[in-house]
Image (tube, grey):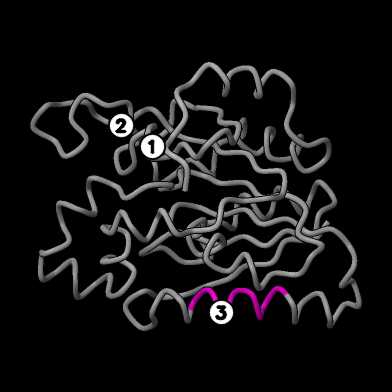
Amino acid sequence: MHVFLIHGMGRSPISMSLLGHRLGRAGHDPHFFGYSVALSALDAIADRFAQQVRTTLDEQDTQDEAFAVIGHSLGNVITRLAADRLPESFARFVMLAPPNRSPALAQRLAENPVFRLMTGDAGQRLADEAFFRELAVPTVPTLIMAGTAGPRNARLPLGQATNDGVVSLEESQLDSVPLITFPATHTFLMNRQDVTGEVLAFLEDGVPEHIVHRAQDRPESSPC
């Protein structure tokens, strides 16, 4: 299966290279998408991502073959923003450490001039709860993978909430989308061998029954 990997804010395609290598060894065809939020608005990035997916499938004459997207952090927001422009053969969506509601950390930093300079339009939209309410909810089989190894301290932006150091578990949840957790931090979640194993199983068979049950035991987020 074609698998498009899209990194998070402030990272590069290199951050997804180990996961992509493992997917390639398992027989999938990984493709990497890169962007800079300091240079482009979020809508423009989403347009370019959708175009890259279409171009790749056209060039290989595989427009009707199923493909998957694996996003990390902001990469998931970009994928949701581009959803109505992606080919109909979009068949699997893996969300690694996604913000599926406005993150407390982004809200706290929104007015910081350094944050504004480095994150541009994307940083401001991350801090906007209305923006998240308008994002498309995935209609393809989707699996959320979230980390839980972040610090918990009342003085930190995420307080005592279970988190990965950047996004809280609650902020990662989206409606009834199944979710599985790992004792990992935000930055390196995609490099874990057990994460790769769950990704491969999901690409092959969809959401395993044990993950569905674990996700149903968690509180759901507000509808988007």
Whichever of callouts 1 and 3 sits on the residue coming sooner in the sequence is: 3
Identify the residue at horizontal 55%, vertical 57% (top origin): 136
* Secondary element at tag 2: loop
Quick one: label 1, few (<14), some, or many (20+) residues within 10 Å? many
Mark 2 highlights which residue? 150
Placement of 185 over or under 88, stated as above or below: above
- In percent of width and height, residue 166 lies at 30, 44
> What type of secondary structure mainly makes up the magenta span?
helix
Say which element carries label 1: loop
Q: Nearer the viewer, residue 85 or 161?
A: 85
Between marks 1 and 3 in the image, the one whose residue lies nearer the viewer:
3
- Residue 175 appears at what percent x and percent y? 52, 37
Q: Could you say which is closer to the camera, residue 35 or residue 54?
A: 54
* Callout 1–callout 2 Cβ contact below 8 Å: yes
Per the image, is 52 magenta? yes
Q: Is residue 28 left or right of residue 217?
A: right
Residue 63 location in percent, x, y?
A: 87, 72
Q: Which is nearer the N-term, disc 1 or disc 2? A: 2
Amino acid carrying label 1: it is Thr
Tell me where residue 51 sits by quadrant: bottom right
- The segment highlighted magenta reads 45-53
Judging by the rendered image, the residue that carries numbered circle 3 is 47
The residue wearing badge 1 is 185
Circle 3: residue type:
Asp
